[in-house]
Image (cartoon, rainbow, N blue to C red):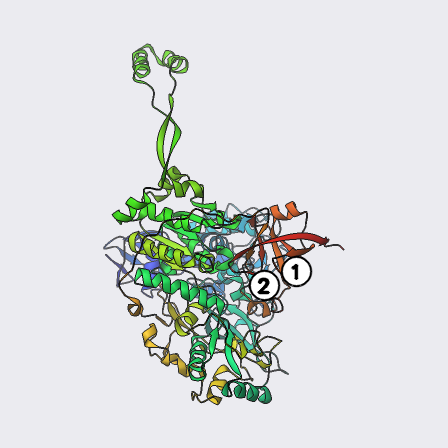
Amino acid sequence: MRVKINGVECEFNEGETILNIARKNDIFIPAICYLSGCSATLACRMCMVEADGKKVYSCNTKAKDGMVVESDLSSLWEERNEIMQAYCINHPLQCGVCDKSGECELQNFTHKARVNTQKHWIQDTHKPHKEWGFINYDPALCIVCERCVTVCKDKIGESALKTTPRGGAAVDATFKESMGKDAYAIWTKFQKSLIAPATGDKLECSSCGECTSVCPTGALIGAKFQYTSNIWELKRIPASNPHSSDCELLYYDIKQSGIAVQKPKIYRVSNDFSFASLNKAARYGYDTQNEAQKDEKAFKLLCEKIQNGVIKNIKFNSFITNEEALILQNLKKKFDLRLLNDEALKFKEFLEEFHQNAGEFYAASSEDITKSDFIVVAGTLLRYDAPSLSYKINNALVMNKGSGLYFHLFKDKGVEKYSKNFLSYIHKSGEEEQILYYLLQKFSTDETLKERLNSFFVEEEKEIEESISEEVSEMIRETNEAGEIIEKEVKKNITKKIKKNIPIKRSLFAKNLGLDEDKMEDLFLKKSHFTLVVGSDFYFHKKAKKLARLLALIQKTTPFKVFLNPTHTNTLGVALLCDLDKEAQNGEILGYNERGDFSFSYEEYCNLASSSLNQQEGTFVNYDKRIVPTNAALEFEGYFLNDVANALGFEEEFTIHYTQKLPINRGFSPIAFDDLENFYTNGGENQRGYLLDLSQYKKTSNLNYEEPEFKALDLDNSLLLYSANPSYQFGRFSNRASALNEAIFLGLSEDLATKFGVKDRDLIRLNLENESLNLSVRVDKDLVGVAYLPYFDEKIDTLSFFKERITKASLEKIGGSDE
């Protein structure tokens, strides 16, 4: 289908709005309140156009084939001029010091609409500044566009903000005659409202900061950035989120520290908020740089230890680039080293088992998720493991009127806010495979498989209500002629619905998981795009390989596309590039950003300092199987891993020279780093790097049926302890940032805190199989029935306490928070 906008022929799909079609074709239509991928609110009305001669609002008007649209008419700009005048009533004239000046949309559109007069006024009211933790709010600068409210609800899924009465003077009714209709409507709404936390005076949210990014003025601003720099002084460095596997596009905004100290400094992180949402770590965890200098003695010692065979193993994590991973693989081959990365190894083994059986890579991408109308999530504490992914799931549920199921060991109240049709089910440890068997039983198109799974039904009696009996119905019909009153009496005194107990078949898997199958049928109704999202609970499960094989069956025999969320930033890249080993061999261990006999790390305990990810150029493989570039925001004056490689016989001047040498047989392309793009188009098309060549992974599938097992973990009154960081903390790397840095704690849900008689910040002793730790308590109001132990502390290797993501423990209180 085609529509003509300002004389330009534009193709579109059914259901697309005029505004989004224009953006895809680089046609400018002004809009202040509308956000791509969110609900239209009509809060600003700046997007008015003429469609086939009729004025409409392009943000919520769907295009029709053959429609002719004009957006640049002088009559439209006259109305927009009045709207911008209304927005400027009593707006403080502080552009010289405002944090948003230089990228302020109110400023831009005021100039664009050529506002040079102000014909209206009203008495202003005192509106004190608000401090909401990571975010500050200046209501005097707020134009109540509701972007912050919309993005929090439609993308993030927290609905932490709302509009609230302004308490200002009443609007002068005479202005209704002197102002345009749209301008008057905007001004009336604007004069009545401000923004406030949804509950009380305190902003209860995950502090992702997305509201500050979408705010068109300086009303919402990051507390740490406020009054530190003018926007136009900052240089934007395009990069990728170094903290989690979304590796989303972000910008490091830098300038020199000051007149005396002229070294570059990161002042904030920004994003293309229309298409790239950031989590808290990505937005605030930016000052992780290492200020170390070159230690020639330690560098020489490290090279000698590798050259002379003293070091026989390299232990590392997945917070590294693909280029570094390739260097490590080259060192392994040349010096017969073993590469140790337990987390990436678990993911690699799971991925390979899935691939061997499905004959292909996991099919789903985050774009598939945002287009889905039925989503199942299992094996991940979603908002904690992958907050950016949770935003996309919430967005799909909201915008596609979707539904789905969320399975986990623990209840998350935050997930329950997403949609009334996104149902949470708590299952026991050991029942993970039954989730997958249920999906196979319900959706598989393989007749042989369905026949075998259909043996797992149980017959139960169910009480049902039948329709009114034929005799009673006839009596009612006979009395109809006598009048309504008699008819009602007959119904009241004679008719009754008949209840019967009849045998029905019920899925044994559904019964064990506590699923209401009638409700399930309602959720599935008229759904066409299915995605199954799984995470680290499955990779570290004692039955991980079986779970991988079941997922392969699901991808090959059901409508579901499977999405495997890699555990850390570049877990997928490491799994593809490195031949990982299970155990160390005799000899010393080099710890690359980890502890070892010799540590080459960005952390304090190191023998030789390495660079932080915001000081490196290179690439990651994100969870969409896309190779994305990241740039160095700050210089590093110490040694890079590439310097070690060169000293040991490899000859590449810069680390990024390995980018075009990433192996083609693993799906990479021989593209130079400087040729990689890193942006989204106006229409949201992803132009970041390139997609992995998945044709490399096509092979004959090897699908085998296995009998289910029905055995849950017996807790024997023990506490079930879960290995997880809080939602903003992805490991020791994020914990280096000043805004996120904290001491390790035990996370306890409110119900467990009450059960054990402890409060927030109380001191407890946590007893594990062979260890005991003294920790403070952090009460988590979002979770139910969970105790979790973080692993971001560089001094305590808590991951060593877990063979899976869960273990048994006990705790006792040893001190109050006031002691």
**Image location of residue 211, percent across then percent down:** 51, 58
Q: Is residue 336 above or below residue 746?
A: below
Is residue 119 shown to the viewer in this render? no
* Residue 89: x %, y % from top left: 53, 57
- Furthest residue to the front? 586
Between 330 and 739, the residue placed more toward the observer is 330
Three-letter code for the amino acid on which mark 2 is drawn: Thr
The disc placed on residue 798 is 2
Give the number of marks: 2
- For label 2, the crowd category at 10 Å Cα-Cα, with few meaning under 14, some 14 to 19 and many 20 or more, is some
The residue that disc 1 covers is: 773
Q: Amino acid at mark 1?
A: Leu
Task: Decide: few, some or many residues near mark 1? Use Cα within 10 Å; few <14, some 14-19, many ≥20.
Answer: some
Q: Nearer the viewer, residue 109 or 402?
A: 402
Q: In the image, is residue 550 above or below residue 332?
A: above
Element under label 1?
strand
Horizontal and vertical percent for residue 395?
A: 42, 54
Q: Nearer the viewer, residue 803 or 341?
A: 803
Q: Position of residue 463 (x, y in %)?
A: 40, 27
- The residue closer to the viewer here, 437 or 687, is 437
For marks 2 and 1, give the CA distance.
Answer: 10 Å
State yes or no: discs 2 and 1 in contact (Cβ < 8 Å): yes
Q: Decide which of tag 2 and tag 1 comes sooner along the chain.
A: 1
Residue 255: quadrant of the picture: bottom right
- Looking at the image, which residue is at 28% across and 66% down? 698
Left or right: 376 in relation to 2? right
